[in-house]
């Protein structure tokens, strides 16, 4: 390959060359080497796969490609076979020989390694037929799992940097108009129209000619990892997006602010930036357009608040990551007081698609006011968890049931918390809500970065509010009184309520706190921090009232309000609960009904978890749940007597 | 250079410097704005949230009002401000209630609460705490004195004000500006004879005695710092204010005129 690539004509040639170079062999094994799959042994699997291919001399027929995240991390290590599209999950090195032989040579499948639907236990052979993938619309994620993120040629072979060439041939204003018309809204939090932001930044005076283009890859929401996945799977898409942005906005210097805890993403990005430089996509006079632009990486320490735009910029400058009031916008005075355009990873990754296929195509996807797709991090009590990219406007029901496969263990759905820790809980009656920026905000939650935590009937909503409130209290920068002290007092009251010490008046205090934290805080962390509290009070006030008035937790979660009991006529006196109990609260002998001493019990629930005969139950007021009966062999002791 | 613009606050037209902080502009017009973290000598910080007002900017719908702190909001042409609306009053009360819980022992906070009409505090008090983390001490030390001794540490509920790593700082000159601006009496300084102890920051200082009466003039470090910074009559550094006044009076008497 002739590098650097100096003109768009050269780029055409280089892409053709890359296509030839990267033409797939008869078989390709796409092996996910994302962070999740690595944790479950993907690299050992890759080693075994390489050894097997070499050992069997299959090198001419099969290529192994280590890709970024496929989104279905819980099934890792996983592979997809090309051309058949067969999907294998939970692979171990010892499965390799069988998989290769059966799939490549016999054209058959190894059934035990195929995907099974969690609720109906149906076997699904092809990736495309797995419900988790079937209902997705993977645009940002299109190449994730299909290219080697460490190989720029792979990106070029798949149309990479063509959108950049196209944009550079256009007037910057026309590029801006296209993004504006596409109605691309920020994927990192607020859903602010990118086109509008770009224009303000472009119009802001830059006395020394410097305008910053920043990519926000801080991703502080616990449980969300779509930005990491995009970078790990397809880093050049983000770089290309930033380059197009720089052209449209007049940007001169780029930064990616990425969390330090993402070592693989950082490594991938460093390599991608180096390659992009070597190929001439970063540097001066890019593709002979006159655009000069380069990107630096800045590692964040992992504070949630540093994802906030002004705190992020302070952090890049080496200052304490505290937000400031945004009366003068960062597009006008941002990093080092220069005009600065900050967008989220996923936002940037959408840009090449828009330029490539046009605003009209983009607005055809999603809803009228929320165009395109959004990647969600679907976690919690759903059958299928992982990253899913869906067109905006899909209903929560479709997201949770069609893609997520419904609630685990046949339990009832209770709520879904969208938008991360500062989002809100949305109840069952709103399951038909379309997921788009405005509908979620109207329901008292938000899109945020796309977290979706599903909760079932065994989740206590007061406890949930307490959990998120305390997270936000810890993560608040602590600068302003309302956020710091307000959240602290809120947390204390929620403690009281969960511990059965709550008073009726405290509900009013909570509502006041919610209001003042929301209205009078300095930044958007405070502005949204009351959402978990406010939304759970709004939709689940009866749970608060039960905790306060009756000392009852219907989800059977709050320790001070629950009691464990032995179901006499089911106890087989197997003794396991007695052995496991850390406080010796259970007494009993062989063939003697076991008894639980409430005074010694600390409600840790170990007995409940270990009992296999359905003879332990947890009780709170009129609510109770009995543990699952998984063994029936022994007879209950009552009968034996 | 400085451009003056007109704003309206509670119906009153005020002239103020464009993009200067709104809070002092309102105060200068005789409007009472409560604050604990604002001081004209240093940059605004927006921590105490008491100076809340409602604003309506040029070009906004008439009935669209935004709640914001006035200390860090700029004076803009045609800005309309409400400092006395029900919403402002309500939120100021909720804010001072939180500050009361934070520093229940600070008389200044209690006074402010009374002034804003708050009697009962419904929150759990943090007994013994005086500091409300307004950061004035650090801003004065940094922006006015230039010593940069103090800094925030931690975040959320663990946020604290002090010297880096809570170690006694070499940079502290013992000037006491931090104590002077502290709105709640949280910065404690003990002076005994020719010794000064910065109790909260853990530094000890020795005073330079007045060459006439022997009473403290300033700490050694402070005087050394000032000598370097300003070029004035040497006598200032070694004479206490009382003796200086005395000396001056004697001079006037001796010379028979001012
Ligand atoms: C407390 C807080 C944390 C945030 N964290 C992130 C983050 O991790 N990643 C991100 O892209 N945006 C985050 N944001 C939103 C950013 O402030 C900003 O709006 C966004 O990066 C702009 O990009 P977008 O318009 O493309 O979404 C956060 C905002 C707040 C208030
Ligand atoms: S004076 Fe404005 S927030 Fe304190």
Image: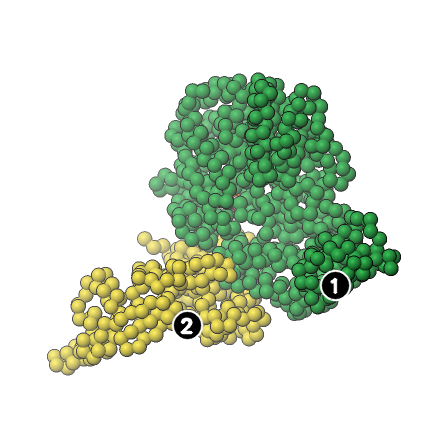
Q: Which mark is residue A587?
A: 1
Mark 1 close to ligand 1, CB under 8 Å:
no
Determine crowd level at label 2: few under 14, some 14-19, many 20+ residues with C-alpha closer than 10 A: some
Q: CA distance from mark 2 to mark 1?
A: 58 Å
Residue A547 visible at all: no
- Establish if B176 lies above or below A462: below
Q: Quadrant of residue B183?
A: bottom left
* SS category of the residue bearing label 1: strand
Q: Colour of chain B?
A: yellow
Image quadrant in which the N terminus of chain A is located = top left
Q: Nearer the viewer, mark 2 or mark 1?
A: 1
Residue A251 percent location from the top left of the image: 42, 37
Describe residue B86's horizontal placement relative to residue A435 as left or right.
Answer: left
Residue A481 percent location from the top left of the image: 50, 63
Describe residue A500's horizontal placement relative to residue B16 as left or right.
Answer: right
Describe residue B108's horizontal placement relative to residue A366 as left or right.
Answer: left
- How many numbered tags mark residues here? 2
* SS category of the residue bearing label 2: loop
Residue at mark 1: chain? A
Q: Are marks 2 and 1 in contact (CB under 8 Å)?
A: no
Q: Which mark is residue A44?
A: none
Q: Colour of chain A?
A: green
Query: Are callouts 2 and 1 both on one chain?
Result: no
Residue at mark 2: chain? B
Q: Nearer the viewer, residue B230 or A302?
A: A302
Residue A128 percent location from the top left of the image: 68, 30
Q: Nearer the viewer, residue B28 or A621?
A: A621
The residue that mark 2 highlights is B185
Instruction: Give the colouring mode of the picture.
Output: by chain
């Amino acid at each position: 390959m002739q590098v650097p690539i100096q003109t768009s004509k050269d780029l055409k040639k280089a892409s053709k060359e890359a296509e030839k170079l990267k033409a797939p062999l008869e078989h390709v094994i796409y092996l996910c080497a994302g962070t999740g799959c690595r944790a479950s042994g993907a690299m050992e699997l890759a080693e075994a796969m390489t050894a097997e291919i070499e050992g069997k001399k299959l090198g001419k027929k099969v290529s192994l490609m280590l890709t970024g995240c496929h989104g279905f991390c819980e099934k890792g290590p996983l592979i997809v076979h090309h051309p058949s599209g067969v999907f294998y999950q939970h692979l171990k090195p010892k499965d390799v020989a069988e998989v290769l032989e059966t799939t490549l040579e016999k054209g058959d499948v190894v059934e035990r390694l195929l995907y099974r639907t969690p609720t109906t236990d149906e076997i699904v052979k092809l990736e495309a037929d797995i419900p988790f993938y079937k209902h997705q619309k993977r645009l940002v994620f299109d190449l994730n799992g299909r290219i080697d993120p460490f190989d720029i040629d792979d990106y070029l072979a798949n149309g990479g940097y063509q959108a950049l060439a196209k944009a550079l041939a256009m007037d910057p204003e026309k590029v801006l108009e296209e993004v504006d018309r596409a109605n691309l809204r920020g994927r990192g939090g607020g859903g602010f129209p990118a086109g509008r932001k770009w224009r303000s930044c472009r119009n802001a005076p830059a006395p020394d000619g410097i305008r910053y283009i920043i990519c926000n890859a801080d991703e502080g929401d616990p449980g969300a990892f779509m930005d990491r996945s995009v970078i790990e799977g397809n880093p050049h898409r983000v770089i290309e997006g930033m380059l197009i942005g720089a052209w449209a906005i007049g940007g001169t210097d780029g930064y990616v602010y990425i969390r330090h805890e993402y070592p693989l993403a950082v490594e991938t990005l460093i390599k991608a930036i180096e390659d992009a430089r070597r190929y001439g996509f970063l540097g001066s006079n890019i593709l002979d357009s006159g655009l000069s632009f380069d990107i630096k990486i800045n590692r964040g320490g992992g504070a949630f608040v540093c994802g906030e735009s002004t705190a992020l910029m302070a952090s890049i400058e080496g200052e304490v990551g505290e937000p400031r009031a945004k009366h003068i916008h960062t597009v006008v005075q941002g990093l080092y007081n220069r005009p600065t355009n900050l967008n989220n990873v996923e936002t940037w990754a959408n840009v090449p698609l828009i330029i490539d296929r046009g605003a009209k195509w983009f607005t055809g996807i999603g809803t009228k006011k929320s165009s395109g797709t959004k990647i969600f991090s679907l976690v919690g009590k759903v059958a299928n968890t992982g990253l899913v990219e869906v067109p905006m406007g899909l209903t929560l029901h479709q997201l949770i049931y069609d893609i997520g496969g419904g609630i685990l263990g046949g339990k009832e759905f209770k709520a879904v918390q969208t938008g991360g820790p500062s989002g809100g809980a949305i109840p069952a009656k709103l399951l038909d809500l379309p997921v788009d920026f405005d509908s979620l905000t109207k329901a008292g939650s938000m899109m945020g970065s796309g977290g979706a935590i599903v909760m079932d009937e065994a989740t206590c909503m007061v406890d949930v509010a307490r959990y998120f409130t305390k997270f936000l209290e810890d993560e608040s920068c602590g600068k302003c009184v309302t956020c710091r002290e307000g959240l602290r007092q809120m947390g204390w009251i929620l403690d009281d309520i969960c511990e059965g010490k709550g008073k009726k008046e405290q509900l009013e205090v909570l509502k006041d706190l919610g209001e003042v934290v929301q209205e009078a805080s300095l930044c958007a962390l405070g502005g949204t921090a009351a959402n978990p509290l406010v939304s759970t009070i709004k939709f689940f006030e009866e749970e608060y009232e039960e905790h306060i008035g009756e000392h009852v937790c219907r989800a059977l979660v709050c320790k001070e309000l629950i009691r464990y009991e032995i179901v006499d006529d089911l106890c087989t006196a197997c003794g396991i609960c007695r052995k496991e109990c850390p406080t010796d609260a259970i007494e009993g002998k062989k063939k003697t009904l076991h008894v639980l001493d409430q005074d010694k019990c600390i409600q840790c629930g170990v007995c409940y978890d270990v009992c296999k005969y359905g003879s332990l139950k947890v009780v709170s007021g009129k609510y109770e749940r009995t543990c699952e009966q998984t063994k029936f062999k022994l007879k209950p002791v009552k009968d034996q007597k | 250079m400085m451009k003056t613009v007109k704003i309206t606050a509670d119906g009153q037209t005020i002239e103020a410097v464009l993009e200067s902080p709104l809070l002092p502009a309102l105060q200068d017009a005789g409007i009472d704005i409560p604050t604990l973290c604002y001081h004209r000598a240093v940059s605004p910080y927006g921590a105490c949230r008491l100076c809340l007002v409602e604003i309506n900017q040029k070009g906004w719908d008439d009935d669209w009002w935004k709640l914001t702190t006035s200390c860090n909001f700029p004076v803009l042409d045609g800005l309309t401000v409400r400092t006395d609306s029900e919403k402002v009053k309500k939120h100021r009360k909720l804010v001072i209630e939180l500050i009361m819980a934070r520093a229940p022992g600070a008389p200044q906070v209690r006074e402010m609460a009374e002034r804003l009409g708050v009697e009962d505090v419904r929150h759990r008090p943090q007994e013994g705490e005086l500091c409300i983390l307004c950061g004035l001490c650090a801003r004065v030390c940094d922006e006015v004195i230039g010593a940069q001794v103090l800094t925030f540490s931690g975040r959320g509920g663990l946020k604290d004000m002090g010297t880096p790593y809570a170690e006694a700082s070499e940079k502290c000159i013992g000037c006491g500006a931090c104590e002077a601006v502290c709105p709640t009496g949280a910065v404690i300084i003990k002076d005994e004879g020719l010794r000064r102890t910065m109790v909260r920051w853990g530094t000890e200082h020795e005073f330079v005695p007045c060459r006439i009466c022997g009473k403290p003039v300033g700490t050694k470090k402070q005087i050394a710092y000032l000598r370097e910074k300003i070029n004035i009559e040497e006598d200032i550094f070694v004479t206490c204010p009382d003796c200086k006044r005395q000396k001056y009076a004697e001079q006037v008497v001796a010379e028979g005129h001012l």
